[in-house]
Amino acid sequence: MAAAQASAWVAEAKLQKAATLWVPSFMIATSYARHDGPIDFNGGVDVPQGLNALGQPAPGSFGKPLNQNLNWFIAGVGLYQVVATTDIIFQPLAQRQDLNAKRWDIQTAKNDALLEVARAYFNVHRFRGQYAGALYTVQEGRKVIAAIEALSRDLVPAVEVDRARNLLAFLEQQAVLHRQNWRIASADLTQVLRLDPRAVCEPLEHDHLQITLIDPSRSLDDLMQIALTNRPELASRQALVQAALVRIRQEKLRPILPIPMVNGFQTPYEQIQVGAFGIGNGGKMNLWYARDDVAPGLAWQFANLGLGNAAMVKWRRGEASQATVELFRIQDMVVADVTRSQALLQSAAARVVQAERELRGALVNYKGVVEGLKQTQRFGNVLKLVFRVPDAVFSLQLLKMAYDDYWTTVAEYNQAQFRLFHALGYPAREVAYFRRTGEILPVNTMRPGFLPPVGTGPPPPPVGTGPPPATR
């Protein structure tokens, strides 16, 4: 965003420069010259021709320049201007459009930055939730193992106990992995926000929070119209097209409109118009005069006999065509972005419902199976468990998968909401499209009972998996 702002400052400076092209430059100049040797101008004295007896110039006798020294000095001020009228008229118009494009680029940078923040933020939510779910399944896995070990050897073979322990080891590894992912996602968020990378970000919202900005059922045609109206990238490219069209008119009129000139005359670089002039022979400079030289004029220039002007018009038309093609490319990108974003949002919205159903079912199944480990049935003289140990192990695996799926789909839903909002150009008026703004309604922020608690701060890793995080 700061880089885009700096580009706008450059464009604004160019506009200010173009707006002052009609103002001549104020010059202060001095110049000194010394001449040694023959001279017959600027005050030099010629040797006369040879004279006859009558005092008249003798035929065939010629004078010659006098070998002498000459000094002269001039100092003064002046106004200097040689700029084409087309530049004075059209350059500010073109630079204005360039500045408009850069200002829209600032909004584009803001939109992109907000999307990156949303993606990183909800990744923190996702992995923090998965970490909480992993810790919960580890805790439940230890309870399952304790319950299995409490059963008699006649009911549970030793291999089943080993299988449960293997699952617990896997769950502990998953907890460490999710804790790592939480810290990595936190580092990504602090990088986007330019915060201390050592900190572990802990969102204030619950991880199950679902943010709805755009209704997933809204029609695609409606969303495309909103995007084509609001996306700053399109406004930026439209401004560049207008700037290119202005430059075409500038080159077409260049040989027709004159070049006004304001300068001096017979002064060094023709830059002095009013000043003092001193001259003298030898080492003297004893003759001083006030001097003014003003030479306004108009000139019409046909570059390369007009062929250069025709080439410049063609050049500017090519730039206008490039800008137009780029505008069409951005339009195609915008509508494709809206289509992709809506597809992701609709899929995530459907999967969130399914993931919540999956999680509730996994919890019911797990609790029922674990409770069944305490119950037995008798078949004759044989005593059997109501639920086998592999059923308990498998139900715990399903519970871990259900937690991961739930946190992932909730985070993807929120990210898809912000992605679609970005694709539409962040039109705030569309947020309340189906539900108009009214009174503030109370929101239940309590964590659902079927979700494991998060606790305060990053929980320490399981025993034996390494030290806790150094900073929070």
Image (tube, grey):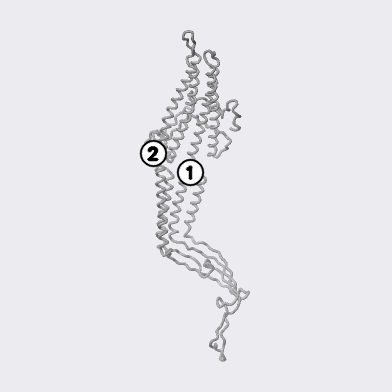
The circle on residue 8 is none
Residue visible at 44% across and 25% down in the picture: 358
- Element under disc 2: helix
Crowd class of label 1 (few under 14; some 14 to 19; many from 20; radius 10 Å): some
Per the image, the residue denoted by label 1 is 109
Measured as percent of width and height from the top left, residue 417 is found at 44, 35
- Other-residue count near label 2 (Cα within 10 Å), few / some / many at <14 / 14–19 / ≥20: many
In percent of width and height, residue 78 lies at 52, 65
Q: At 46% across and 33% down in the image, what residue appears? A: 412
Residue 465: x and y, percent? 59, 28
**Residue 65 vs residue 240: left or right?**
right
Snapshot quadrant of residue 195: top right
List x then y, in percent, for residue 170. 53, 25
At 48% from the left edge and 45% from the top edge, which residue is drawn?
A: 106
Q: Give the answer, above or below, for where 265 lies relative to 374.
A: below
Q: Secondary structure at mark 1?
A: helix
Nearer to me, 54 or 372: 372
- Observer-nearest residue: 73 or 156? 156
Looking at the rendered structure, the kind of residue marked 1 is Ala
**The C terminus, quarter of image:** top right
Spatial distance from mark 1 to mark 2, Cα to Cα?
22 Å
Pointer 1 or 2: first along the chain = 1
Q: Amino acid at mark 2?
A: Leu
Q: Is residue 262 above or below residue 132?
A: below
Q: Is residue 222 above or below residue 98?
A: above
Q: Quadrant of residue 309?
A: bottom left
Q: In the rendered view, would you say 9 is above or below 441?
A: below
- Specify the label residue 223 is tagged with: 2
